[in-house]
Amino acid sequence: MKNSTLIKLFILVVTISSCQTNPEVKQIKEGYVMSNKMLSTSSFTEVVSDQLKNELSFFGKITADNKKLIEVYPVVGGNVTKVFVELGDYVKKGQLLATIRSTEVAGYEKDLEDAKNDVIVKKNNYKVAQELFEGKLNAERDVIESKSEYEKALSQLNRIQETYRIYNMNKGAIYEVRAPMSGFIIEKKINEDMLLRNDRTDNIFDIAEINDVWAVANINETDINKVKVGIDAEVTTLTYPDKVFKGRLDKIFNVIDPETKAMKAIIKLNNANFILKPEMSATIKLSYKEDKQMLIVPSSAIIFDKSKNYVMVYKDRTHIDTRQIEVFRQVGDITYISAGLVKGEKIMTQNQLLVYDALND
């Protein structure tokens, strides 16, 4: 009787244990199903083919556009009495930058006074010659000569006055350095009380408009044959590492710099907010197309795990496959695929890592 009871008890325990394990087996067989919430927040894209791109990276710097840069030179030597601007200041055309007291200006001032006095004398002589001719006391030739001398004196005065206007000279032997254009002071080589030599040949200010700037790339000799005018360019700087400035290669200097052993190329960039400054270091990426078609996917769709690359291939909410792929090349936000995918397949571009973890834990 006791054995019969024990046997029944054992059968009951086995039956209960079997009933508890059945739901787990059923759940495994059903697999992963994407929820409505996950589906609504996910993004997908179709695998397509495109022309293969290559990308070259170079170091360079930001410079002012040479066409919008003026070097300011002093036309006289002397003592710098006042400097009104500093490096980085924005100035308007005609704005006073500095004043220089000069003996040369003093000489011009004397010439101006002499020219004014000469005009007065020659004008009076001409007037007297006319009156004498009207009174038949001299010949017409005397009148013509007096008129000629008067006109020469006027011409000389006009020349000196024009020199004053061009060189911004004032009384007191003062030479005014004024801005020839509007822009930023990007170089300054003058300070108060500095003595400037008459034979000075270097500039004292550089003024540049920087609403447009140049990114100058140093092209290695091995890459010269790959670089062409018009190809796409992306520029980043140390100051703004996460900001990409896009443009095209505008000009190539077909000369090798003997110091850097590189060829310079220029990318013109819009700089409306003046955030790019001349002499900033820059990394310049130039991309060009090759004569080959390959499958492409967004770089953000790729999952890198255990030294391999994967994407999540989506068919429907119950059929999502983890697919290993072979990456041929990544250019910016586009990755070229050499194996693992077929054109037209749909892959996940958002929430793919969550689905990957759910399927591969």
Image (tube, rainbow, N blue to C red):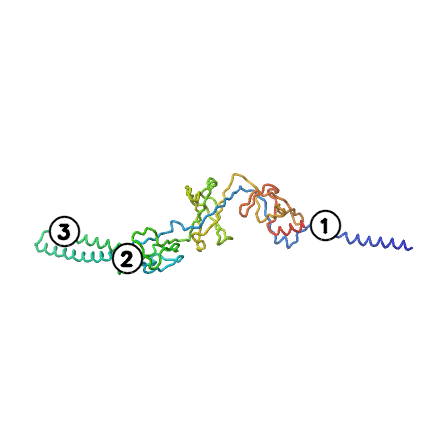
SS class of the residue under badge 3? helix
Residue type for callout 2 = Ser
Q: Nearer the viewer, mark 1 or mark 2?
A: 2
149 lies left or right of 184: left
161 lies left or right of 9: left
Residue 112, position as x, y percentages in the image? 22, 57
State the residue at coordinates (9%, 51%). 139
| Residue behind mark 3 | 145
Residue 174, position as x, y percentages in the image? 28, 59
- Residue 253 is drawn in which quadrant? top left
| Label 3 packing within 10 angstroms: few (<14), some (14-19), many (20+) | some
324 lies left or right of 203: right
Mark positioned earlier in the residue sequence (1 or 3) = 1
Mark positioned earlier in the residue sequence (3 or 2) = 2
| Residue behind mark 1 | 28
Mark positioned earlier in the residue sequence (1 or 2) = 1
| Residue behind mark 2 | 102
The CA span between labels 1 and 3 is: 120 Å
What label does residue 109 carry, if any? none
| Label 1 packing within 10 angstroms: few (<14), some (14-19), many (20+) | few
The CA span between labels 1 and 2 is: 96 Å
SS class of the residue under badge 2? loop
Residue 114, position as x, y percentages in the image? 20, 57
The CA span between labels 3 and 2 is: 38 Å
Are discs 1 and 2 less than 8 Å apart at CB?
A: no
Residue type for callout 1 = Ile
Residue type for callout 3 = Glu
